[in-house]
Image: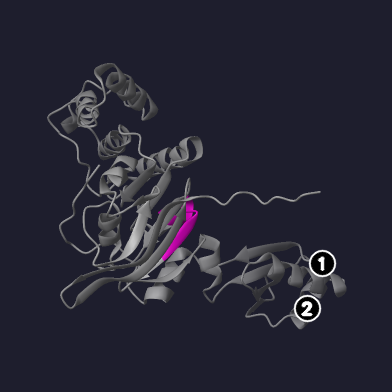
Amino acid sequence: MIMTSAPAVSAAISATGLTKSYGDKVVLDGIDLHIPEGTVFALLGPNGAGKTTTVQILSTLLPATAGQARIAGHDLVREADAVRTAIGVTGQFAAVDNLLTARENLLLMADLHHLDRSEGRRRVTELLHRFELTEAAAKPVVTFSGGMRRKLDLAMTLVGDPRIIFLDEPTTGLDPRSRRTMWEIIRRLVADQGVTIFLTTQYLDEADQLADRIAVLDGGRLVAEGTADELKRRIPGGHIRLRFADPAHYSSAAALFDATAHDSEALTLRVPGDGSVTAVRAVLDALDRASVRAEELTVHTPDLDDVFLTLTGRDRSIGEANSPKETAR
């Protein structure tokens, strides 16, 4: 029988040695990226780490000093127009016209994308429905809430049907309900349409919720990359908590493990572990060999806050430095 392997997923975004400097000041110091199609990639970093600079370079708004990149299969420099056709960019601040209605804003984008009138209207109606803005379509944007403005801003980005979307801090300033609505929209874009999302965010839980892979940028360099779970397992402090119903079983387990915490009243032990299947299996096997029964086992791993603080040694606030931002669509 002939065995065939599954085809490799094509890269939506790839970059090698991407560098940006202003005189002696190095903003990006040779970063490499490989982002598969149909995934969410999150870029985290402290103030001034180079997140927005990375987005601006990859979206053709800013030339790199050195390095190469391909976006949707197109060379970033030689095929810049093809790159712009394939991408959409939504910045931190909603780029909508307050004096126009939601429908008028979308129709304006359809005209800018040179869609014919019937196709433009069809696309606008579809997007208004998808983003639950149909009832507000004829209202001026100045009357919209922050969440509605962000939804309209993303809908305007989608008028051109991009395959890759750069979201630069898309939920900044939104209330928790509006943030979760945006999360669901982003998930559907990936799951239903295979869109690739490049996300920068100042909310670590947002990256944890949405991203297939996360990279941490510090001082213009990528200091770590992996899934959220992989990054968490790199940080000390993970443990397996065991709770027992029987004091005798608790005492027997305490003799088995080099626990970092004992609670004889609650009958619990905290056993160091990285939360991996291998670590959990080792604990269960040890209990089984000693005929000790645990009532409950829970795995505790560091969160992304711990990862960020450990890798960067910076404050938890990771918003980009206060510098002018350009927005393209």
Tally the marks.
2
Helix, strand or loop at mark 2 = helix
Helix, strand or loop at mark 1 = loop
Q: Is residue 245 magenta?
A: no
Do we see residue 52 in this rendering? yes
Is residue 141 rendered to the left or right of residue 5?
Answer: left
In terms of depth relative to the viewer, which is nearer, 245 or 164?
164
Q: Residues within 10 Å of mark 2 (few under 14, many from 20)?
A: some
Q: Nearer the viewer, mark 2 or mark 1?
A: 1
Q: Earlier in the sequence, mark 2 or mark 1?
A: 2
Quarter holding residue 132: top left
Q: Residue at x 41, y 62 (%)?
A: 33
Which residue lies under the disc numbered 2? 251
C-alpha distance separating marks 2 and 1 = 11 Å
Q: What stretch of residues is rendered in magenta?
A: 206-215
Residue 136: give x, y in percent of width and height.
27, 23
Q: Residue at x 27, y 49 (%)?
A: 80
In terms of depth relative to the viewer, which is nearer, 276 or 268?
276
Q: Residue at x 40, y 49 (%)?
A: 73
Q: Residues within 10 Å of mark 1 (few under 14, many from 20)?
A: some
Answer whether labels 2 and 1 touch (C-beta < 8 Å).
no
Residue 192: give x, y in percent of width and height.
49, 35
Examine the rendered structure and indicate whether residue 311 appears above or below residue 168.
below
Look at the image and name its color scheme.
one colour
In terms of depth relative to the viewer, which is nearer, 319 or 115?
115
Examine the rendered structure and indicate whether residue 297 appears above or below residue 161.
below
Quarter holding residue 243: bottom right
Residue 258: give x, y in percent of width and height.
69, 83
Which residue lies under the disc numbered 1? 293
